[in-house]
Image: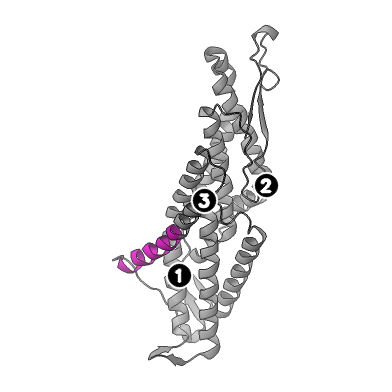
Amino acid sequence: METSIPSLLLVLWLKSLLNWLVVVVQRHYMTRSFSGFFCISLALIDSLLSFALGAIFYLENFNISGWHFTRYHICLLAQIACFIYDALHWPVFLLVGLDNFWTLSSSSTHTSWKQKLTYLAGACLLWIVAALYVFWEPDFVLLIGDAEEHQCQLFSRSQSSPVLVLLTVTCVILYSYAPFERWRVHVFQHSTQQSCLVCLRRAMHTFLSTWSSFLALMIISPLLQIEMHAHLQLNVIWLCFLNSFFVALALCGRSISSNSKKSDTITDGFCSWYFCFTYGADEWNYGQQPNDRIQVKTLNV
């Protein structure tokens, strides 16, 4: 996919501005999770890349410490960035999920300085490993394009992780509202299972009420065959969306095994996860008799 160098620089600057806008607005939550630290590192890398490419485009032909730079290097650096960002998608996807499940399963509600150092080291290590992987990959081939004509050849990655998120959200919603739920409840009579269904509904409602427009964009983009460069698909908004998605799943998993009545304030800066799960006959009255209704249980999450 050929892209003009001026439009590439403009998009990179706009992406960097949007990244920093989200980071600054959500600064109180960025140091509480791995996704927040990676968002900060991504904003820094995008800014450095934008400054470097902008300087090369403006100066056109110059030397620094024996290194000769021309507009050819704009396409070179942009292509390398595409490969590195593409390699980061699935590791970040998995690490954000593991961090949220681990954090919500622990009893502590505060992020210690040791955790923050671990997050910082993990984000830095992830960038280094991704860069080494790209340069050591035997199939790594640069498609530079014609820099003299102000054109760069960049590739767009397959949107596999957004598709997986959409499928997971759809499956969770269908499961929580499945028609065979009544049969399952009447047969097993497990209050834990019933409370989990209520948790699924409320967590998904909270998630969808915040990110519905973003999900609609994820659905429309493949249908309209909109191509996005790999370095654009990895952005702070996408990482915040992933964080909210995994918080919702972690809360649903926690409701199955947790018997705590402790009130925890959980937030990711976007979704308000402070709500009370009240389970009882009013939540799932499937034609049961009043004396068969289950006693109300309250779990504050």
Q: Residues within 10 Å of mark 3 (few under 14, many from 20)?
A: few
Q: Are marks 2 and 3 in contact (CB under 8 Å)?
A: no
Residue placed under numbered mark 2 in the picture: 210
Q: Depth check: 149 or 131 in front?
A: 131
- Cα separation, mark 1 vs mark 3, equals 33 Å
The numbered mark, 2 or 1, whose residue comes first in the sequence reads 1
The answer, for residue 180, to whether it is visible in the render is: no
**Amino acid type for the residue under numbered disc 1:** Ala
Residue occupying the far left of the picture: 138
Which secondary structure is most common in the magenta stretch? helix
Q: Which quarter of the figure has residue 260? A: top right
User: Closer to the camera: disc 2 or disc 3?
Assistant: 3
Tell me: 280 left or right of 132: right
Q: Earlier in the sequence, mark 1 or mark 3?
A: 1
Most extreme residue toward the front, as rendered? 113
Secondary element type, mark 1? helix
Going from the N terminus, do you reach mark 2 or mark 3 first? 3
Position in image of residue 115 (x %, y %): 48, 52
Which is more foreground, mark 1 or mark 3?
Answer: 3
Magenta residues (range): 121-136
Q: Give the alpha-carbon distance from disc 2 to disc 1, as whole Å.
A: 31 Å
The residue nearer to you, when weighing 3 against 32, is 32
What is the distance, in whole Å, between disc 2 and disc 3 at their CAs? 28 Å
Magenta-span inclusion, residue 100: no
Residue at the image point whose x is 64% and y is 57% from the top: 26
Residue 112: mark: 3
Q: Position of residue 136 (x, y in %)?
A: 30, 67
Three-letter residue code for mark 3 = Ser
Residue 87 spot, x, y in % from top left: 41, 60
Q: Secondary structure at mark 3?
A: loop
